[in-house]
Image (spheres, rainbow, N blue to C red):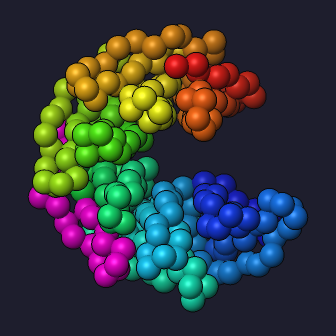
Amino acid sequence: MTQRRLGHSADRLETHIILIAGNTTADFYDPVTEIINRTVSISAPRFYFSSTTIEVNATMNVLLSGGIAIDTGTTYLPTLDVYNNEIKTFNLTRMSFARYYHTVTLLPNGNVIIAGGSPVRPTILDTLEMYNSSSNTFMNLTARMSSIRYYHTATYIASIQSILFAGGSSTTSNSLNTYDLFNITTLKFVRNGTMLQSRTAHTATLLNNGQVLLVGNDPESKTPELFDPTTFTFRWAANQSVARGYHTATLLGNSGQVLICGGDASSVTLNSCEIYYP
């Protein structure tokens, strides 16, 4: 890369272009030639933010939201930076709140739901706002999660047109065992309840069968669970080989398998991976 980065993002912008963004710049990496073709400045320094790709007028853009301004600092950002792939620049706009360790969920209509996170220590939010990618504007939503949350997950489940907000923390030291279901048509919460265990710094992966696999916790856990949207219930999945938190989980295409890698266990950074077979 052209500069050192942590708490950064990597999003596929085109078939052979990966946008690697964070710190003060974004690199355009071609995985075929293994070359960085171009580097542009982002609108403001940004670390530990959330990102997603958005298609606007048949052009794939990348959205960077929230995070912190200095990698070791506590200045949380209230801004959103959108890379416009048509004019090849970033454009800055302002969210309703600063947010750190929040979630960003892309909807089928191109809008984005931004939820939870922390605007400033030790405050944690239960609020949601919606970004309209066509008009580049934000709308505060009246619906609120059943608990303040950050370090949580947000998974869009098409079969029930709802976002599953799961776990997270409501203080700097606890993890939550609660969930909320948010309907994207009515923009209201339609259900909430408890999971089988508390989870924060975990992953939530939508499987090919429509269920959601939740893995990990802080402190680390090796007991994953599955959410079934047809019954709105949770059940235990097969135990992991290694207890983890702060890991990654990647769905492996049509096989439906999930690759789970790295993470933390008892303050030791892991180098192992394992595969979940549905």
Q: Nearer the viewer, residue 27 or 268?
A: 27
Residue 82 position within the rendered picture, expressed as x and y whole percent measured from the top left: 48, 75
Residue lying at 51% horizontally and 63% vertically, measured from the top left: 53
Query: In the image, which residues are magenta?
Result: 129-147
In the image: residue 32, left or right of residue 215 = right
| 189 lies above or below 100 | above
Q: Position of residue 133 (x, y in %)?
A: 36, 74
Residue 90, above or below 67: below
Locate residue 47 relative to residue 202 in the image: left or right. right
Residue 122, visible in the rendered structure: no
Instruction: State the residue at coordinates (15%, 34%).
Output: 191
Residue with the most extreme bottom position: 87
Horizontal arrangement in the rendering, residue 139 relative to residue 122 (left or right): left
Q: For this rendering, which residue is in front, 18 or 150?
A: 18
Let me know if residue 142 is in the magenta part: yes
Q: Is residue 86 visible?
A: yes
The part of the image, by quadrant, that contains residue 186 is bottom left
- Total count of labels: 0
Q: Residue at x 57, y 89 (%)?
A: 87
Q: Position of residue 150 (x, y in %)?
A: 36, 44
